[in-house]
Image (tube, rainbow, N blue to C red):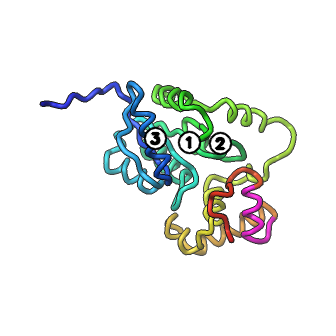
Amino acid sequence: MTEIINNNEIRVLIVDDHDLVRYGFKSLLNEQDGIDVVDTVCCGEDAINWCRDHNGDIDVILMDVNMPGIGGIGATKRISQSWPIIGIIIITVHDGGPLPKILLKGGAKGYLTKGNAVDEMIAAIRDVHQGKYYIAKDIAQQLALSVLPGEINPLDILSMRETQVLMMIAQGTKTKKISEILNLSPKTISTYRMRLFEKLDVSSDIEMLHMAMKHGVLDENNMPIK
């Protein structure tokens, strides 16, 4: 019997380093009419390789941020540059700080937190597939408030790459490993570290970790520096 393929279905790839999250999202979404989770992968590198192996044949990617390797920041940037037609929706535990602004500037088309309702995730997938942006209401409100006079988040001054390096350092990744993952020399990573110290006015990785946690880039579950 010939398999009938519904070309109207939204093809989704899930990227998250937690098995339960991947399988939970997949089960929930595959129950929805018009949505097909074609695969799940556990890190940003695998997401890039999947897109390369399948010629970018995916409509929407649900992307976590804090993952081993290049993480969601690096994967979002590379995929949006190489396959701009793919709609990337960030789904993370981070509901504030500089990450929404950084990731949306870096190519993401949607931003949700893992505390948002399933219906909102489905709405985001449908909107992004239609070429629209979708930002959860609580995130949109924070983005709007961030442009008003008031307290400034010191991490807002960091570039996308600087934020990526900051997160990797704070998660305890060694300089040599970071250089291998990002395909940069150890000297360049050390330069990034010194630049981060200067911009954030800190003098150690521990101080940088505390600042990252205070301002919403890391949480207690992100393998902080011991």
| Residue nearest the observer in this picture, 63 or 117 | 117
For the C terminus, the image quarter is bottom right
Residue 47 x %, y %: 42, 51
Question: Residue 112: x percent and y percent?
Answer: 60, 37
- Is residue 163 covered in magenta? no
| Residue 166 in sight here | yes
Q: Are marks 3 and 2 in contact (CB under 8 Å)?
A: no
Chain-order first, disc 2 or disc 1: 1
Q: Which mark is residue 169?
A: none
Q: In this rendered view, identify the residue nearer to me: 79 or 127.
A: 127
Q: CA distance from mark 1 to mark 3?
A: 8 Å
**Which amino acid, mark 2?**
Pro
Q: CA distance from mark 3 to mark 2?
A: 16 Å
Question: Could you say whether the residue bearing mark 3 is in a helix, strand or loop?
Answer: strand
Q: Which element carries disc 2, helix, strand or loop? A: helix
Q: Position of residue 193 (x, y in %)?
A: 68, 68
Residue 61 - label: 3
Residue at 39%, 24% (x, y): give it.
Answer: 33
Does 89 sit above or below residue 210?
A: above
What type is the residue that disc 3 sits on?
Answer: Ile
Q: Main secondary structure of the magenta part?
A: helix
Dots 2, 1 in contact, CB < 8 A: yes
Q: Which residues are magenta?
A: 202-213
Above or below residue 205? Residue 99 is above
Write down the residue under mark 1. 90
Going by the image, does 177 lie left or right of 58?
right
Can residue 85 be seen in the rendering of this structure? Answer: no
Tell me which residue sits at (62%, 38%) in the image: 115
**Mark 2 lies on residue:** 100
Q: Is residue 209 magenta?
A: yes
Identified by mark 1, the residue type is Ile
Label 3: few (<14), some (14–19) or many (≥20) C-alpha neighbours in 10 Å: many
